[in-house]
Amino acid sequence: MIGDPIKHSISPQIHTAFAKSSGQNITYTKLRVRPADFAVKVKDLLGLGVKGMNITLPLKELAFAFANKLSPRAKFAGAVNTFKIEQGMVYGDNTDGIGLIRDITQNLKADITDKKILLLGAGGAAKGIIKPLLEEAPEVLHIANRTISKAIELKNQAKVYNNVSASGFAAVSDKFDFIINATSASVNHAVPPISAKVIDKNTVCYDLMYSKEPTSFLLWAQQHGAKITTDGLGMLVEKAAESFYLWRKIRPATQDLLLKLRK
Ligand code: NDP
């Protein structure tokens, strides 16, 4: 796993647990890599014979440019979080979106199809999740962002799907079945300035950020009566499982690990 900062990453813990539970002999470690050193460090790692890498902030776009071949979901996202190395070729994938979808559909047992979804944010994480979300065929996907032009840009990128709209936060007042916070507002204990009218007693509120305590967005959602509120720990574990599958063709069990990490 490479990124900067990297100290906080629990990915080695997750992949070591996957390897143990699935009987795979792997070594997974984390390394701080600054953007300016990306190409040199990755070439060094390839020279050492690594079989795969996870790439996190702020290196995902650099990884996208570096890959020899890309998955369709990485192409759409313009960002890569997983490398698989085969015969010297670097295959780039993006498992963020499928991680979110698996957490919602399998862990939360919620269905996105025909539902109204509000996506807050239009940064890197939003770009990674929008295609997998749209492939679940929601009735509507509305993107709201602080910088409106970025929300519109993302909507235009998804124009083959005809159920996508975009705006700033102030223009949003309809009720939604799912509200997915893909902004980084919770990092600073802030909440995107949207009307509480978007929530009713059936709304699922999902914050991509995860932390020991409920995030500011999830506290806000609870105060306004959301049915389910959850953070992005499940997404983290599920996207790791998808990377593991790409490398080893084995899908590791995630439930026990997720429970353990929550504790
Ligand atoms: P980016 O920096 O690429 O994008 C940040 C987004 O948040 C932009 O849309 C930005 O709006 C918006 N934003 C920032 N501050 C505020 C604020 N105070 N109010 C409203 N909007 C705000 O970050 P990422 O997309 O990479 O990450 C977003 C979040 O997702 C982070 O919290 C990250 O930890 C989490 N994440 C979780 C993952 C998981 O596996 N659980 C995976 C990836 C990300 P603007 O465009 O106007 O600047």
Image: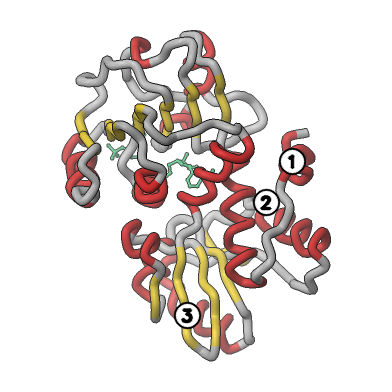
Residue 89: x and y, percent? 47, 85
Give the residue pinned by disc 3. 90
Image quarter for residue 191?
top left
Crowd tier of the residue under label 2, counting other residues whose Cα lies within 10 Å: few below 14, some 14–19, many 20 or above: some
The image quadrant of residue 263 is top right
Q: Name the residue under label 2.
A: 10
Judged from the image, the quadrant occupied by ligand 1 is top left
For disc 3, does the CB lie below 8 Å from ligand 1?
no
On screen, 166 above or below 8?
above
Question: Where does the image place residue 67, in percent across and percent down from the top left?
Answer: 41, 76
Q: Is 210 located above or below residue 64 in the figure? A: above
| Amino acid tagged 2 | Ile
Q: What element carries label 1?
A: helix
Q: Which residue is drawn at 54% across and 90% down?
A: 87
Secondary-structure class at tag 2: loop
Q: In which quarter of the image is the N terminus?
A: bottom right
Above or below: residue 196 compared with residue 184: above
Lateral position of residue 168 relative to residue 86, left or right: left
At horizontal 50% and vertical 51% (from top left) the residue drawn is 98
Distance from the alpha carbon under mark 1 to that under mark 2: 10 Å
Kindly identify the residue that appears in the image at 60 percent across and 32 percent down: 108
Q: Which of marks 1 and 3 is nearer the N terminus?
A: 3
Residue 107: percent from left, percent from top: 63, 37
Q: Amino acid type of disc 3?
A: Val
Label 1, label 3: how many angstroms apart (C-alpha)? 31 Å
Q: Say which residue appears at 41% left-offset and 43% top-offset.
A: 136
In the rendered view, does 213 fall on the left or right side of 87?
right
Q: Are the residues flagged by discs 1 and 3 in contact, CB closer than 8 Å?
A: no
Which is more toward the observer, 131 or 10? Answer: 131
Residue 261 bears which disc, if any?
1
Answer whether residue 120 is visible to the viewer in this image: no
| Image marks 1 and 2: residues in contact by CB distance under 8 Å | yes
